[in-house]
Amino acid sequence: MPFDRSWRRWRYALEGLALVVSLGVVLYGVCSYHLAVDWTRNERHSLHHASKLALTAITLPLTATVYLPDRHPNRELAKNLVVRYQRAAPALTLHFVDPAAVPELMRNEEIREGEITLSAGDRRERVRQYTEAAFTNALMRLARKDSQWLAFVSGHGERSPSRGANFDLSDFAQALAQRGIKAREVNLADTPTIPDNAAALVIASPQVDFLPGEITVIQGYLSRGGALLWLLEPEVPGSLQTLAASLGITLTGDTVIDPGAQAMGIDDPAMALVSHYETHPALGRFNATALLPHATPLVVKALPGWQLAPLFVSNPGAWGERSSLKAAVSFDAAEDLRGPLTLGLALRHQAQRIVLVGDGDFLSNAYLGNGGNRELGTRLVEWLAANEALVEIDAVSAPDSRLDLSPWQIGVMGGAFLIALPGACLLNGLWLWWRRRA
């Protein structure tokens, strides 16, 4: 019937229109809205917690400017990196600038092609690698109010922030530099005063005695509200007894022996494992195990007006050994200190902040990468420098950048690619040959 044919034509037209409208809505949604789901085991493609904290530490409007020519292939890489941060901070704006359009700016500001400039107020930081670690480190430097530096006491055989020996602290100094804290060595014999603009003073395991005047300089700096990080060892120069006594510290000379380390497969009995941390602004939610080789326990008596806060202690089974470690050691209740032993301590008096750690090896080049040593050190420095907002921001890494397979998994993959897949191709060829022949 004519009516039926007319109705079918209208129905087909309406169905076609509905299909076009549906496709248009889908395409509009795809182009206008983006949904990203990270299914990696360790959320490799999501922002690290430290990156989110770095974003929240910046209160001023944040702008990322990428200097790349039009249609440059790296534009997409830079955009993808910044977009990850924009999901956590929508106020972050992104601009692309063609270097050829601003040659004077590139020359005057010494900007390289491909760099990302992060701006917040009148402060600028640059990102030269399109990685989350580089971007987050730049955010940390941007969040720091002013450039800060640590004064490392030198001239007494201390661990150096510039030398690369296993004993020294150059790797730790580099980690601090990425956060915007620079390290300088100060010889108190040449510089009789410690600048008040130093974020903190560091005494890192000196080997020889200080002059009486040097002790006076350090005490004067602390009395003016200075901060101190003192890395102690079982053997401490006698001249530092005066400084220790002024802080209520008793230097025992003991070495911490931790049987729990041997249970974890560590042969050195003088390797102390630290896994218990007290509640303190310098530690926050930190819970990584730290390794302290040849540590010494801290025996401290609180002085009037000072706030004393233990930071971390040894395992309960550890003890402070007073005899030589050359022979076999065992706990002697009559002489040795029974654990748990205090290995990290924070002192505070008005503006003064002091952190004492019964070990300097844990920040050395030889041991910095073990466990949570590096993060523990950076947290202590940030607290000493009164940067509470930056304490919990640690370096970002890619935890699942390696693919580790068990032997049976390797066998399955090898069998699939070397036997099953070629065999399937061979069988398919034989089947086609048989069909065509028939």
Image (tube, grey):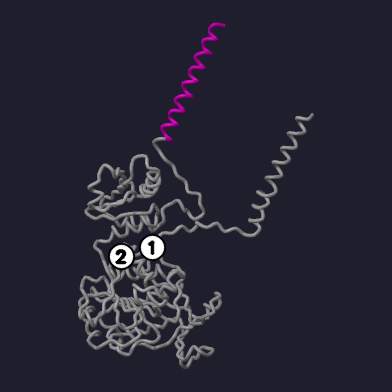
Asked which quadrant contains residue 426, the reply is top right
Which mark is on residue 394?
Answer: 1
Which residue is identified by label 2?
388
Question: In the picture shown, does residue 274 fall above or below 325?
Answer: above
Asked which quadrant contains residue 70, the reply is top left
Horizontally, is 43 left or right of 345 in the view?
right
CB-based contact (under 8 Å), mark 1 and mark 2: no
Q: Indicate the secondary structure of the residue bearing disc 2.
A: helix
The answer to if 23 sits in the magenta stretch is yes
The answer to if 362 sits in the magenta stretch is no
Question: In the picture shown, does residue 289 fall above or below 426?
Answer: below
Q: Residues within 10 Å of mark 1 (few under 14, many from 20)?
A: many
Give the residue displayed 78% in from the left and 30% down from the top. 437
The Cα–Cα distance between marks 1 and 2, rounded to whole angstroms, is 13 Å
Magenta residues span 1-30
Asked which quadrant contains residue 245, the reply is bottom left
